[in-house]
Image (cartoon, rainbow, N blue to C red):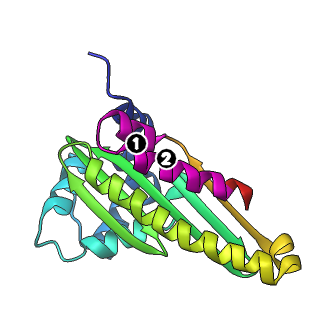
């Protein structure tokens, strides 16, 4: 059976287990997050993350997300730069055992989800959240362009990068309407004009 294109994208990326153990030692995880890992490190890690009573889960995801872009490809990355202001919004999805781990950062807020099937709903919501933010930023950019032409021209930049075209994929799977896809593509075109 041919693998699903989204799942293929996820599995060709560095696995969550490889990312964690490339960047963090078992001693560090034990000292910082109170994780004592067994012989099967990936399974032990997954058990901690699935355990609702594990008190350090949010702190763990916040910490490990800080350098994730150096090792793994996001589904999308939205960047804004204006003078000293910088923003990066990203969405990552990984496999860990039979589970999918989704991590989104938006305004330095980290959200995550761990589920046993492809995380359509989480990814669609994060795309929608990001595009809502994009729309606000594009309006601000228009105001800057009108009121401070030199500052805008010299210091403002914005870009959206897709490593996997999740929008087209969601549309083909019937999870995104043609009107919503058109609306998102129009926003993408506006980003290119900034």
Question: Which mark identifies residue 61?
Answer: none
Residue drawn at point x = 44 percent, y = 38 percent: 168
Left or right of 19, for residue 3? left
> Where's residue 36, x and y in %?
21, 64
Left or right of 89, for residue 19? left
Left or right of 137, for residue 25? left
Report the front residue among 97 and 86: 86
> Where's residue 158, x and y in %?
68, 63
Q: Determine the image quadrant of residue 60.
A: bottom left
Residue topped by disc 1:
178
Mark 1 vs 2: CB contact within 8 A: yes
Magenta segment, which residues?
165-191
171 magenta-colored: yes
Residue topped by disc 2:
182
Q: Determine the image quadrant of residue 140.
A: bottom right
Mark 1 Cα shell of 10 Å, populated few (<14), some (14-19), many (≥20) = few
């Amino acid at each position: 059976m041919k693998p699903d294109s989204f799942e293929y994208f996820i599995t060709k990326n560095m696995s969550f287990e490889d990312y964690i153990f490339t960047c963090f030692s078992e001693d560090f995880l034990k000292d910082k997050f109170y994780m004592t890992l067994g012989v099967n490190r990936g399974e032990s890690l997954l058990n901690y993350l699935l355990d609702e009573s594990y008190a350090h889960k949010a702190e763990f995801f916040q910490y490990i997300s800080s350098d994730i872009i150096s090792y793994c490809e996001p589904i999308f990355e939205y960047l804004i730069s204006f003078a000293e202001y910088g923003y990066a919004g990203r969405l990552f999805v990984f496999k860990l055992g039979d589970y999918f781990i989704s991590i989104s950062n938006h305004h330095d807020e980290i959200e995550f989800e761990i589920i046993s099937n492809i995380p359509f709903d989480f990814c669609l919501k994060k795309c929608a959240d990001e595009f809502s933010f994009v729309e606000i930023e594009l309006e601000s950019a228009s105001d800057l362009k009108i009121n401070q032409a030199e500052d805008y021209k010299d210091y403002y930049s914005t870009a959206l990068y897709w490593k996997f075209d999740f929008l087209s994929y969601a549309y083909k799977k019937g999870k995104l309407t043609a009107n919503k896809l058109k609306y998102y593509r129009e926003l993408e075109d506006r980003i290119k004009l900034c």
